[in-house]
Image (cartoon, rainbow, N blue to C red):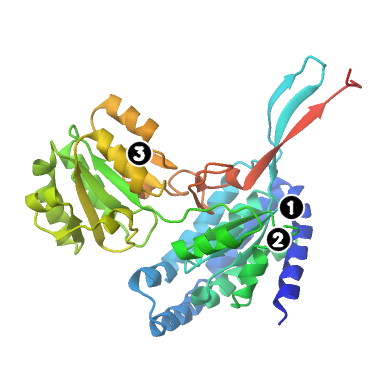
Amino acid sequence: MNITDYMNNLGQAARSASRVLAVATTAQKNKALLAIADALVAKTDFLVAENEKDLIAGKVNGLDDAMLDRLRLTPAGVVSIATGVRQVAALPDPIGEIKDMAYRPSGIQLGKMRVPLGVVGIIYESRPNVTADAAALCLKSGNATILRGGSEAIHSNRAIAQCIIDGLRSTDLPTTAVQVVETTDRDAVGRLIAMPEFVDVIVPRGGKSLIARISEGARVPVIKHLDGICHSYVDATADLALSWRVCDNAKTHRYGVCNAMETLLVDAAIASAFLPKMADIYRAKGVELRGCPRTCAISPMLAASEEDWSTEYLAPILAIKIVDGMDAAIEHINTYGSHHTDAIMTQDYAKARQFLAQVDSSSVMVNASTRFADGFEYGLGAEIGISTDKFHARGPVGLEGLTSQKYIVFGQGQIRQ
């Protein structure tokens, strides 16, 4: 296979499909999405069987438990994926929306219209649900997409892609609106991120090394986050029972996800009352704790190193640090964090507002688990990824993050004087 020719063909087909999707009606797009959801459910047994091939290969190839967890697809998982596709169909269609119409002194009427980005390339690892989630979001937002999953999920991704194609075939939209790269050759990725004539934006989803590699080599704009070093800060005024429950969930609900808490910060004024029970809760669930010297003095645990403060574990490991007040907590978060998701536990309204204003992250929370930083939980139906960039899209990227705006002008023969 000539990779350059193969990827060029995908790109040309996607560009042509994007022009059709840009003018597709909401009814057309929703019909396709519902057909895709039905196809996924109808082929549940097939999808699980294909996924099992990937799981077996993954174990043989030494994938760790966190990676296998991301890869696993159960019958309930298939239903959840199909539900997500239907939720996207139920969302308002942003395309064609016109806002901020106003008359200018010249008499022209000026506004902004929301439009698709065009062609979205998505490069991801492990999670086969991304294939359906990304396809649904791109389709609803009027974008064609080229999907390149990891080799560890090749059987799962091909199976889901077949369901998507089956759904598109039942409509009058082109089946090339969603294309999955069939080869596992890594040169395909290099070509995908370097053909701006066909691709308008790249969304990488996976480990830090993958995203860094894509960002460094791309000739196409990239929507990305490198890692999820998420913090929870327990303020001196925090409700202890609430904080034990929330901080437990933030770490132990799931380990191998980017919105799991990796560092717990505790105000020195409340540390002796809060930490012993919190540490017992974590230990009972098998979490390895690594603390600063003051933390270890209150609850014996492994000593944390400087590297721990900037590590995304994606595992049952947690770093804990005692800080002298909220200013120190904010300084730590902005120094060591990844601008993903950070939370404060407090009963002080003024402190909550200060934390929201000064923590430089894409999601900032008060008295809530960092695990809520998710497209489904934010009402986006699904997410194509999470962006820690500050331009175009930030936080969970749903339909609106896959669109742009253009100025539109209505006139009645006005000329520039």
Q: Which residue is mark 2?
A: 177
Q: Which residue is mark 3?
A: 365
The one nearer the camera, 24 or 31, is 24
The one nearer the camera, 50 or 288, is 288
Q: Position of residue 69 (x, y in %)?
A: 38, 69
Q: Position of residue 228 (x, y in %)?
A: 39, 54
Quarter of the picture holding the N terminus: bottom right
Disc 2/disc 1 C-alpha distance (Å) = 8 Å
Badge 2 marks a residue whose secondary structure is helix
Residue ID at (35%, 45%): 335
Horizontal arrangement in the rendering, residue 361 relative to residue 170 (left or right): left
Q: Amino acid at mark 2?
A: Ala
**Pointer 2: residues within 10 angstroms few (<14), some, or many (20+)?**
many
Residues tagged 2 and 1 counted as in contact (Cβ below 8 A): yes
The one nearer the camera, 89 or 20, is 20
Instruction: Tell which circle, 1 or 3, labels the residue nearer the N-terminal end.
Output: 1
Disc 3/disc 2 C-alpha distance (Å) = 37 Å
Badge 1 marks a residue whose secondary structure is helix
Q: Is residue 25 above or below residue 51?
A: above
Q: Amino acid at mark 1?
A: Leu
Instruction: Tell which circle, 3 or 2, labels the residue nearer the N-terminal end.
Output: 2
Residues tagged 3 and 2 counted as in contact (Cβ below 8 A): no
Q: Position of residue 121 (x, y in %)?
A: 63, 60
Badge 3 marks a residue whose secondary structure is strand
* Front of the two marks 3 and 2: 3
Q: Which mark is residue 21?
A: 1
Q: Amino acid at mark 3?
A: Met
Quarter of the picture holding the C terminus: top right
